[in-house]
Every structure is written in C-alpha cells, then in structure tokens.
Image (cartoon, rainbow, N blue to C red):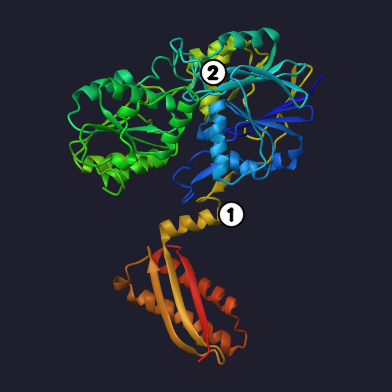
Amino acid sequence: MDQVRIFALGGLDENGKNMTVVEVNQAIFVIEAGLKYPDSETLGVEFIIPDFSYLIENKDRIQGIFITHAHDDVMAALPYLLKQVKAPVYSGALTANLIYDMLKKEKIRDVKVHKLKRTSRQTIGGVQVRTFGMTHAMPDNFGIAIGTDQGYVVYTGEFIIDYDMLSKEYLCDLNELSDIGKRGVLALLCESIGADQPGHTSPHHRVTSYIEPIFEQAQGRILISAYRQSLFRVIEIIDLVKKFNKKIFFHDDELRNMLKHMEIMGYYKVPREMEVMRQNFKDEMEDVVVLISGSGKNLFRTMSNIANHEDSYVSFRPSDTIIMTSPVVSGTEMDASIMENEIYKEGGRIFSLNSKTVLSMHPSSEDLKMMLYLFKPRYYIPIKGEYRHLIANANLATKMGYKPDKIVVLDNGQIAQFENKSLVSVAQHLELEETLIDGKENWDVTGVVLKDREMLSTDGVMIIGIALNYKNKKIIAGPDVQTRGLIYLKDADYIIKEVGRLMEETVQAAVKEKRYDNLGARGEARDKISKYLMKETGKRPMVLPVIMEMNV
C-alpha cells in the first residue's frame, strides 16, 4: 500500500503561518504558504514565514502547491517559497489572478499557476486530487482531498456552514463532501480557531444588522474599516452604502484592485454612480462613506494616521462616525489599542463590533461536527490554531465517539506516518526555525539582531569617538561621548568624563605596550566601559567605540 506522511511546517500552536505537507510515497503536495504577524517582542520584524528547508532539499519531489484562498495567512509567503522552489501552483480562479499580481510585483517568472474549478478532479504526479467548494470570506475557496489506497487525506481549509449562501462562488458543496466520505477517508484535517465556540458560526458572521442602525443615526461622514481580504464583509458594507443611497470612496488601492478582479469574473460589481474616484475625492465631502482597508496591523496604523491628521487623503474630524468591523487578531493588539486611543483623544465616536458577537468566518463546534459526520475519517488531525484550540477541536472528536488513539494532535515538524490504514509513528521530527522578514526582503533577521534591538529599546546606546594621528597614534581629538536612551547627560557629567578617560587610557596603554590594533582596542574599550556603566547605572547599553585614524 501507499506510504502516507502528514506534517505541518507552520500553523500549529500559532495563529497564521499555515503550511501543511502531505506525502504519498515520493510525491509531495504542499497545502498553503502563509505568514503570521509577530508579537511585540520581535522588534522591527514585519512578519514571519515558515521554514522552507525541507521543501528546498526535496524540491524535485514537489508535485504542486495548493492555495485554498487568497488570505495572507495561507498565501502571502508564496513568493518567498517560489523564489527557491519552482513548483506548479494550483488555486481557484480569483486567487490565481491575485497570485499573478503578486508574482508580477515580486518579478517571479517561470511559475505555472493552474486555475482549478471549486469542484474538480485531476491526477497530479500520479495521484488523484479532488477539490470541493467551501464557504469562506473569499470567493473561490476550496478544500482538498488527496487520494491514496489507504483512503483520502482531506484538508477542509477555512470554512463555515451557511445555508443562506446563494452565490455560487461562495457555496459549500455538501454533496461532494458526502461522496468523498462514502469512498473512505484516512485522515481529516480541520482548522481549530473556533472549536471552543458553541453552535454554528452562521449567521453570526454577518455584520449588516449591527451596522445598519449606525448608518441610520449618522449625521455626517462615515469612516468604516474592514480587513482588505474579508471580501464577504466588504461587499456587505458596499451593499449597505447602496441601500442608504450614499457615495463610497475606497481608501485602499489594493482592495479596489481585488474588486476589479471580481467584476471581471462576474462575481460582483460596484455601481459606478455611487463610487467617488480618487481624483474627485475631497476631504471636505460630507455625505460619503470612506472604506478604509488593509491587512493585519497596517489597517490600525492607517486609522491612527487618519486620527493624527497624517493621512494623504482623509483627516479625522469630530463629526465623523467611525465603525470598526475588523476584529483584533493576534499580533495587532497594540496597534489597535493605540488607534482607538488616538480617536478618543480627538473627541471622536467609535463603534467597534464585538468579536464575541460578530464571529469571523471560521468553523464553530457544530460546523466541525458536521465535517466529522460527512467524512467519517479513520483519523482526525486538528490544525490551525494555538494549542488550546487544537485540544478543543480534539475534544469535539471525542464527543463524536472517536477514541483518543484516532485523534492526532501534532507539533510543527512532527510527522504522522500511516501504513495499511493505521498510524504507525509520530516519532520523527523536522527541526524548524521561523524565518523573520524585516522590511521588504531581509533574510538575515537572526536572534542576535533581535537581542540587539531589545537592548537598544530597554538600555539604550552609547557612542564614544576618538581621533588618532595615523603615524604616531597620538590622540588629536576627543573623546566625544554621545548617548541615546541611557542617561540624561547634564545629570551625569561624571559618567561621561569617566567613560572618556577609560577610552583614552585603553588606547594609550595599547600604543605604549606596542600592541595597538584598531579592532582590538575598540573591543577592549567596549568591555571596560560596559562593566563601568553596569556598575554605575545598572544598565547594559550597546557600547560602540569609534577610533578614527587620520593623516595630519
């Protein structure tokens, strides 16, 4: 029989950075390639992506990379992978168009992107792969079933069950799910973020009933925020603007581009007469809804800029009604708090939707139970979420009659191996390290760099400069001492004088003993000054001695 191995390179015991690998004999199938936003301790890091080492080492065996939908937590790390692994990509039609935009922006060529129907069957690398439509915040979202002679490995992707969903690009294909279940499922992988929420997510994912009364009461301009990639919610907002016969201005060009893709594909069209184009928009306009969007913490930073009158297009005024439809997600808490504080300082009114009342479009407990009921898998593998979410998802399976030995809770890099329709091992682990992306494309953000940033943020920096005659090594200028974030110079003149004396003494001693070396003298001075500053201030600042040798 086929040998099947299942493991995650990201997404377990964390929110985001989703990447799952399914191996059928020698064929490797990669499902999703996402990022996550860092917490406040990873200073200066923009986002974090999975460790691709295993995929790079085995790139010749990769048959395809499947992107289930166009959210950052499942797609945004794709360019970083494709720069090192030129494997074919499979996705839905809208997602494929957005991937083309991404690859063009990153100047990545020679990558084939296949557009799959939401319900499809194909053979890839000698393995049957089926896709099935699932309802989520993005159109063209799908799940994947990878065929083996032990049964299907099913990855549902992110979804909810919504019986009122009528648009075909959002529909969940329950018939296809049932058919796969009847043919036999070896392992079912379901996301866990909402596993501890009772009931179904639907209809609590819809925001119209919550924000419509706010629209009715608003006297002036409305500023409303939404995550760029929550297109389902964005369309709800546009439809409400249409209902109240208002104009709308799209603050974010990337969102407008996504809506253009939807229009080209016949999914949704923004009425031309209600849109205020960028060249016609004026901040003085009153009867207009400004839709502000972005991804992750950038959305809250944009709102803070508007509140501080630092935005290029919109300046906040107290008569504005502000509606936040975007829940605070992991890694954005600080930026969201700063944003809200700035708005209140300006005397604004802000309406924030409660994340416990208005749910994000992830499965709650009853949605997950339905997947178990339809697929009837031999093994259940909770994925996507912090460890408490994974355990809550596992507990759901026990309530559905699954024994603990049929529920597999894994860590990132831990490999579940199946033979003859049985789990035979979870002992093998891949050693993984997170890849920290600093700015646009800096691959060298290591633990040492982060430690330096932490030191600078807490203990500050001291720079000590001195100039020497290049020929005889006599001091001709300095020492000059500058500090930032350590001490107030006027109150610590004696420390500055002593630091300068230590610098001079170190250089003079090295010259006198005929062992002077620029690099060595700087290192020696750094050690002496650091010990002195620790004794006097209790701090360990970054100490940077500078010795300039000049021809005079």
Asked whether residue 69 appears in the rendered view, the answer is no
Which of discs 2 and 1 lies nearer the camera? The answer is 2
Of callouts 2 and 1, the N-terminal one: 2
- Residue at 57% across, 23% down: 157
Under mark 1, the amino acid is: Asp
Q: Label 2's element?
A: loop
228 sits to left or right of 515: left
What is the C-alpha distance between the residues marked 2 and 1? 38 Å
Q: Position of residue 486 (x, y in %)?
A: 38, 64
- Residue at 35% across, 38% down: 251
Q: Position of residue 349 (x, y in %)?
A: 22, 34
Farthest front residue in view: 273
Q: In the picture shown, does residue 401 fall above or below 514?
A: above
Q: In the picture shown, does residue 34 fall above or below 550?
A: above
Residue at which label 2 appears: 134
Under mark 2, the amino acid is: Met
Q: Label 1's element?
A: loop
Residue 197 in which image quadrant: top left
Residue at which label 1 appears: 444
